[in-house]
Amino acid sequence: MDRLRSRFDDVGEAGDVAQGETREPRRRWWHLLRRLRWSDRRLYPLLEAHAALCVDALEQLRRLLADVGDPDGMIRQIEATEKRADALVEEIDGVLGSMLAPPFPRESILALVGDLDDIVDLVEDAAESVHLYHVTTVTPDAERLADLGLASARKLQVAVAALARLDRPRAILALCAEVDDLEAQADHVMRAAVSKLFREEPDARELIKSKAIFEVLESLTDKGKDVAHDIKSLVLKAWGRL
């Protein structure tokens, strides 16, 4: 019986060794993947640059709305900003394609980039609408909507920059919540502005133009909210791995 027990013990020890030998390559491979995932930082500067372009575009739009005569050529500057944003999207796509292990799921990163790019596209739409509709005056409500969009973009810029380290995830989530609040404020401004427009604007053409401008400006905070949700999703997914 003692000899039999000894044989079983020997088999058990051999099994433990074999299992340990199997686990060790897996463990080394997992650590390698993590090192590759977190050491490749090419992506983060590009994301930060795109978020910065959103802020630049909205600042340019705000200056355009302050003087729709556009003496400083803000419309052309906005168009140039939109082209730089498109180039960044292509560069980010190329970097993602070359990365063995992106820090976040590829589809989640692409969703974030797409929504950031939509902000710049909407700014260009707003600028072109001012030009094509021959807008000569801008109401305080329109300026307020642009201000809210700019405030949203600035918070998103900070949140995107914080993704590189993720050392303060709760602070990022708080910024996302603030962006949601700005979107709610913009909804309120939009409803009040349209209500006032229908009550007080006698010229149907001016009413249609102003309403169209309101809508595209309000959509800036809508898209900002989408970006905030993208960032929140990335943070929550990463939080589960930290």
Image (tube, grey):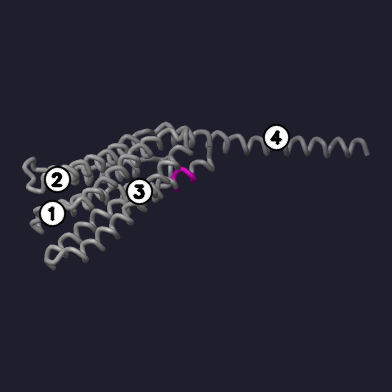
Q: Position of residue 130 (x, y in %)?
A: 13, 54
Does the CB distance between marks 3 and 4 fall below 8 Å? no
Does the CB distance between marks 3 and 2 fall below 8 Å? no
Residue plotted at (83% across, 39% down): 8
Q: Quadrant of residue 88?
A: top left
Residue plotted at (37% across, 46% down): 179
Q: Which residues are magenta?
A: 233-237
Regarding residue 17, the answer to whether it shows in the image is: yes
The amino acid beneath tag 1 is Val
Quarter containing the N terminus: top right
Q: Earlier in the sequence, mark 1 or mark 4?
A: 4
- Element assignment for label 2: helix
Q: Give residue 64's mark.
A: 2
Mark 2 Cα-neighbour bin, 10 Å: few <14, some 14–19, many ≥20? many
Q: Earlier in the sequence, mark 3 or mark 2?
A: 2
The amino acid beneath tag 4 is Val
Mark 3 Cα-neighbour bin, 10 Å: few <14, some 14–19, many ≥20? many
Does the CB distance between marks 2 and 1 fall below 8 Å? yes
Q: Earlier in the sequence, mark 3 or mark 1?
A: 1
- Element assignment for label 1: helix
Viewer-side residue, 30 vs 19: 30
Label 3 sits on residue = 182
Q: Position of residue 28 (x, y in %)?
A: 55, 33
Q: Earlier in the sequence, mark 3 or mark 4?
A: 4
Label 4 sits on residue = 17
Label 1 sits on residue = 130
